[in-house]
Image (cartoon, helix red, strand yellow):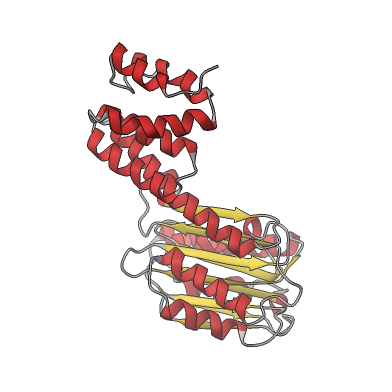
Amino acid sequence: MSRRFYFITLFIAAFVSSAFSQERSSLVHTYSIVARDPASGQMGVAVQSHWFSVGSLVTWAEAGVGAVATQSFIDPGYGPLGLDLMRAGKTAPQALAGLIAADPGEAVRQVAMIDAKGKVAAHTGSKCIPGAGHIVGDNFSVQANLMLNEKVWPAMAAAYKNTQGDLADKMLAALDAAQAVGGDIRGKQSAAILVVSGTNTGRPWVDRVMELRVEDHPEPLKELRRLVHVHRAYQHMNAGDLAVEHNDMDKALREYGAAQTMMPDNLEMTYWTAVSLVNAGRLDESLPLFKKVFAGDPNWAELTPRLPKVGLLNVDEVGMKKILNVAPKK
């Protein structure tokens, strides 16, 4: 063990003891999943609870390090402290064991951790409110407490293993399966999903693949799925913006078009698809899209003449007149 690693471990261990003695628990009973996609290396956490803003307390993850779900009579310190230990070189089982050993309230905690190599650990304290339990699988752990019945976490594990798609798809399937067999005995209120990259680039805005929260909603899982869909559409928008920045109009058109196909009623996505068509020399094809957008909100027609000045719309005066002619007459 290097001297640096030794002193980091000692510092974290000392901090853990003081942190657990000072934190007050919150009653975040819930079901959740931590998981890692072996193909992409992405890691994530997804959760649902009958508690306001569950994602602000339960979900923790760092690219290239690991992911943590901390719940039941929650101590949020398990999140950052678990990540600190894994960043310092501890495996998820070692990190969790160290934190549990230092926590006088471990009997009421439920925690799961996964590290960047796919090692997983979970703890369900002896005083977690039934139904409570967890299943640790290959590159994932599902855990639940205060459930209507004990079918919840086995259903989550089965859904995760049997669902095709990316990490977000599989974790959402696990949450849906939990709810389908009974879920939280109190009902439902909030949900969240957090996904990070398998490697750390030092740019958190790049490494954080997805972070979405439903703070308070009668159908939090349905709303979370809707937000995931919107997020994916805007990923295409972001890629289109980057293509415009690099003057790759063909790619911009593909990306904006993909976003617009996913969300055909979103005026902004339709608008930038129309702009990309013009920039690709397909002005006539753009006109129906401009017409739809201008009818929905005339401010887009007000914006359009400003774009050539900053190089975002390659059109002459004749072309601009054609575009503005499809706007509703004042």
Classify residue 282 as left or right of residue 202. Answer: left
Residue lying at the far front in this picture: please name it: 329
- What residue sits 46% from the left and 58% below the top? 195
The image quadrant where one finds the N terminus is bottom left
Q: Is residue 321 above or below residue 225?
A: above
Q: Position of residue 292 (x, y in %)?
A: 46, 34
**Number of marks:** 0
Q: Is residue 327 above or below residue 21?
A: above
Along the viewing direction, whichever of 265 and 235 lies nearer the viewer: 265
Query: At x 47% / y 50%, what residue is drawn?
Result: 231
Q: Residue at x 34, y 17 (%)?
A: 320
Give the percent coordinates (x, y) of residue 258.
35, 47
Left or right of 320? Residue 183 is right
Q: Is residue 280 left or right of residue 180?
A: left
Which quadrant of the figure has residue 124? Answer: bottom right
Residue 43 picture location, percent across and down = 43, 64
Instruction: Identify which residue is drawn at 46% across, 77% down.
Output: 160
Residue nearest the viewer, comparing 11 with 61: 61
The front one of 158 and 249 is 249
Q: State the image coordinates of residue 164 (x, y, percent, origin top left).
A: 38, 73
The C terminus, quarter of image: top right
Can residue 310 be seen in the rendering of this structure?
A: no
Q: Quadrant of residue 97?
A: bottom right
Q: Is residue 282 above or below residue 13?
A: above
- Answer with the quarter of the image where residue 125 lies: bottom right
Residue 238 visible in the displayed image: yes
| Residue 266 drawn above or below residue 158 | above
